[in-house]
Image: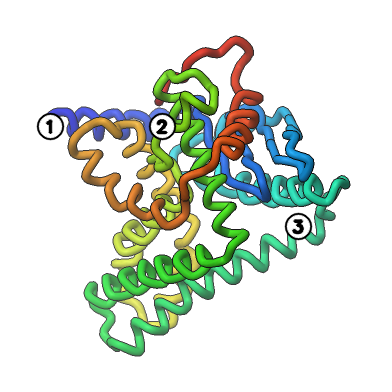
Amino acid sequence: MTHRLADALRSVAVSIAMGSPIPVTYGGQAVIEGVLMRSNTAYAIAARRPDGTIKVLYQEMEARAVSSPVWRLPILRGMATLAEMVVLGMRAISWSAGVQLGEDVEIPPAAMGLTIAGSALFAVLLFVVLPFLVARGVSHSTSLASVLLEGLIRLLVLVVYLLLIGMIGSVGRLFQYHGAEHKAINGLEAGAVLEAEAVTGCSRLHPRCGTGFLVVVVVVSVIVFSPLTLLPIWERFLGELVLLPLVAGISYEGIRFLGRHRYASWAKVGLMPILGAQLLTTREPSTPQIEVAIAALARVLPSGATELSVP
């Protein structure tokens, strides 16, 4: 096991040195009564209409993490991918809402910018500012222990937040579609036929997931923020804000690294909290919900593709 881990770490070092591009992978997110799926070159959104039929929107795109020599560099590619997913996710939610209303709905660029900015501000206040202030209230120390305390508080806030929003009925359905998204991708990666009956038995948990990403962010933030304990308290706080993109980029690389080696025994241990956190944000989907996820995923597959080579 030690040799396999050493080989895996060596491959990461080579990848970072060469700035190798991201392999083709498939991912997505749940939207209103539907699922968004994307590859490196296209995305598709499938949503169930009120009359029971499925509507699909397909759009070709070229991810910056693939097309740009700069943004495909390790860590930077994570920042680019996350930014693109935020914008794409907003568009997908807008479109899926329109499907339910029976009309085309498009968020104006200015409104989308304000929505994204507001969401980012809320996330910073809840997961950065609040843990920082609570940790300072409990301990005025600037030692490594205070950084660990802040990380634990941040993790607790995340868990409580997910538990509370999961009690909302509409969010519960969203979590079912999240489970359907994972089942479809797990089925594809396992070589299963992309049909609801074959995919139903697949796991609703997946190594590459936004919820798991947040767990990795908590761990990485403790490491990255540790040197800041040498600074005065408010300079340290500003330093944490500045370093957030770096934390996100490193976390992106970490979760993809673990996902790539998911079957190794050491990786399984690292993936336990990542997969465990998804129990809060995924629920067992119904067959019609799985059909929606498959409709979106099938649309972004290359023509004639029958299997996926997991990077």
Secondary-structure class at tag 3: helix
Q: Would you name the residue on which mark 1 appears?
A: 1
In-image side of 11 versus 121 (left or right): left
In the image: residue 205, left or right of residue 222: right
Residue 199's spot in the image, x, y percent?
A: 47, 28
- Name the image quarter holding residue 195: top right
How many residues crowd mark 3 within 10 Å: few (<14), some (14–19), many (20+)?
A: some
Label 2: which residue?
A: 201
Task: Name the amino acid type tagged 2.
Answer: Gly
Secondary structure at numbered mark 2: loop
Camera-nearest residue between 130 and 269: 269
**Residues at marks 1 and 3 touching, judged by CB atoms closer than 8 Å:** no
Q: In the drawing, does residue 57 fall left or right of residue 294?
A: right
**Residue reaching furthest top?**
304
Q: In which quarter of the image is residue 296?
A: top right
Quadrant where the N terminus sits is top left
What residue is pinned by disc 3?
A: 112
Q: Is mark 1 on a helix, strand or loop?
A: loop
Q: Which of marks 2 and 1 is in front?
A: 2
> Cα distance, mark 3 to mark 2?
37 Å
